[in-house]
Image (cartoon, rainbow, N blue to C red):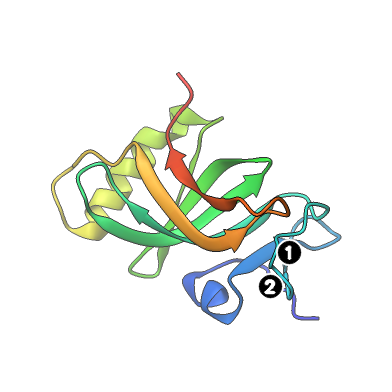
Amino acid sequence: MTVFRNLEKESFDHCPVWSFAENMQDYRPVLAPSPLPGDRGPLFIKAKFEAANGTSLEGYVVHQGIVYAVGIFVNGREFTFNRRLSDLAEPTLTALFVALDTEPFELFPLTFTTEFCLANGERVGGVFNFIE
């Protein structure tokens, strides 16, 4: 089975859903992601995003019962936001705006959609924001 050390945009083009490998450092593709398996720990799911200002972005969500983190791909770089680590968001936002070559804008709340459903039929999608 294919195992990747890092997930990049091309990884999600290869397979849209990933989980941790047994060593919890590498990633393996989830080959039958419909419905999404509930027994693999966190899942990394290809997603499309719309920022609060309407800007479209691509990346993935990290789902384990809830979506608690997102990764956004821009120009070969990954920008990760974890709602449990909101203090790390400011420098990541600054770097994201530099990569986008734009003035800062309202990114959050960040609406996301995926093509995948949970076992109960509910589609994985919603709004990502930081816990206050």
Location of the N terminus (image quadrant): bottom right
| Left or right, 89 with reference to 4 | left
| Mark 2 neighbour class, 10 Å CA radius: few under 14, some 14 to 19, many 20 or more | some
Q: Which residue is mark 1?
A: 26
In primary-sequence order, the first of circles 2 and 1 is 2
Given the image, on which type of amino acid does mark 2 rest? Phe
Q: Nearer the viewer, residue 128 or 4?
A: 128
- Residues at badges 2 and 1 in contact (C-beta under 8 Å)? yes
Q: Secondary structure at mark 2?
A: loop
The image position of residue 109, as x and y in percent, is 34, 36
* x then y, percent, for residue 43: 67, 55
Is residue 56 rendered to the left or right of residue 85? left
Q: Residue at x 54, y 72 (%)?
A: 12
- Residue 29 lies, with reference to residue 41, above or below; the image says below
124 with respect to 72 (left or right):
right
Query: Which residue is identified by label 2?
Result: 4
Q: Residue furthest front?
A: 121
Numbered label attached to residue 75: none
Alpha-carbon distance for marks 2 and 1? 6 Å
Picture coordinates of residue 55 (x, y %)? Answer: 23, 54
The amino acid marked with disc number 1 is: Asp
The residue located at (45%, 29%) in the rendering is 130
